[in-house]
Structures are given as C-alpha cells and as structure tokens.
Image (cartoon, rainbow, N blue to C red):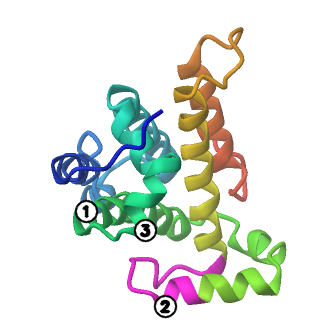
C-alpha cells in the first residue's frame, strides 16, 4: 500500500465528524438521558459506522500511516483526536459520577509505573484532569478495545464464520464496558 498523506481537507472532514459522531460531542454526552453504559455503546456504534463509511480516513488516523499524521502535529488532526477523546472522557465522567466504574479495582491492579504515567497524562491539558487513575486507565482500556475491534474488522482479520460483525462488535463493546463496572452492564 503506498504511503498516504493526510490532507488538510481530510483532517477537516474528520474534525467535523469527530466533533459529532451522529450528534455525540462532549456537551451532548453530558445532556443525554441514556445511562453511561448505553451511551458508550451508542457512541461506539456511531464511531464504527463512520469508520466503515470512511475506511481510508479511519486507517490513516488509527492505522500505521496515521501515526505519522499524529507525530507531525497537524492542528486539524490534533483537534479531531481531542474531540474523540473528549467524548470518551465525558462518558467516563458520567459513569464515575453514577458509581458504575470500579476505579478502586482498576487502580489496585495498576503498577506504580503506570500510575505515574497516568498522573503525567492527567496533568497535560487534554481534558482528563479531573478523572481518577482508575477512570483514566478505563478510558485507555475502552479506547484500545474500540479501535482494536474496528481495525480488525476493516483489515479483514475477523474470522469469516463470524459474519455478523455488528453483533460481534456490540458484544465486544458491552463486554469492554462491563469489565470496568462494579456490577455487570447488560
């Protein structure tokens, strides 16, 4: 595959998309009536739908070549990534406030080196400053599972007999959220 360069037009389109995954941005997350777990699933589904409709752009940002676009610090790409992360932070804030996320269990499993890295990340101005270590780790866990599931599907690495990708994706996202909770999310 030839090396692709993220154009300003693509970055601008991504920024517009990421600022509202079918109506989801950090302000609409706070205003929604959906419980945080259901909201996570809805936002994940919207993100997957965009990725399926815009495979080249998605893989530019989250695939191998996307790392180059991020490292070049394109301001439009930075805004797009920040918008995506801020939506996830907003959902996590609501989930922690609702008492759904078992931050104590997550923190207890965390090595000191990771706790120090999370503190450094929290101190950076990227929107996660008020989240405890367990919630920041939970953000990374769900972020990795979201993008891992989408990337495996886009690259054709899901076993062919599992043809109902939507059902598999929903199961993966529900499980990702439930694994972080005090009580299973259903």
Q: Which residue position holds label 2?
A: 123
Mark 2 neighbour class, 10 Å CA radius: few under 14, some 14 to 19, many 20 or more: few
Q: Which residue is drawn at 59% across and 13% down?
A: 164
Q: Which residue is drawn at 55% across and 45% down?
A: 146
- Residues at marks 1 and 2, CA–CA distance in whole angstroms: 22 Å
Q: Which residue position holds label 3?
A: 71
Circle 3/circle 2 CB separation < 8 Å:
no
Tell me which numbered mark, 3 or 2, is placed earlier along the sequence. Answer: 3
The residue closer to the viewer here, 186 or 120, is 120
In front: label 1 or label 3? 3
Mark 3 neighbour class, 10 Å CA radius: few under 14, some 14 to 19, many 20 or more: few
Mark 1 neighbour class, 10 Å CA radius: few under 14, some 14 to 19, many 20 or more: few
Residue 124 visible in the shown view: yes
Report the span colored magenta: 120-133
Q: Which residue position holds label 1?
A: 27
Quadrant of residue 171 within the rendered picture: top right
Residue 27 within the segment the image draws in magenta? no
- Residues at marks 3 and 2, CA–CA distance in whole angstroms: 20 Å
Q: Is mark 1 on a helix, strand or loop?
A: helix
Q: In this view, does 79 lie to the left or right of 89?
A: left
Q: What element carries label 3?
A: helix
Image quarter of the C terminus: top right
Tell me which numbered mark, 1 or 3, is placed earlier along the sequence. Answer: 1
């Amino acid at each position: 595959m030839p090396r692709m360069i993220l154009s300003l037009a693509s970055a601008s389109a991504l920024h517009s998309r990421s600022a509202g995954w079918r109506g989801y941005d950090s302000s609409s997350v706070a205003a929604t009536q959906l419980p945080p777990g259901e909201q996570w699933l809805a936002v994940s589904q919207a993100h997957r739908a965009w990725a399926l409709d815009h495979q080249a752009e998605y893989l530019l940002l989250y695939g191998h070549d996307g790392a180059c676009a991020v490292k070049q610090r394109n301001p439009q790409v930075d805004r797009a990534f920040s918008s995506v992360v801020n939506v996830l932070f907003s959902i996590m804030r609501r989930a922690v406030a609702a008492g759904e996320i078992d931050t104590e269990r997550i923190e207890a499993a965390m090595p000191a080196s990771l706790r120090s890295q999370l503190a450094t990340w929290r101190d950076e101005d990227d929107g996660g400053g008020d989240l405890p270590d367990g919630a920041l780790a939970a953000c990374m866990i769900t972020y990795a599972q979201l993008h891992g599931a989408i990337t495996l599907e886009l690259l054709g690495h899901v076993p062919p007999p599992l043809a109902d990708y939507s059902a598999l994706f929903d199961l993966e996202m529900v499980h990702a959220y439930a694994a972080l909770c005090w009580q299973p999310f259903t």
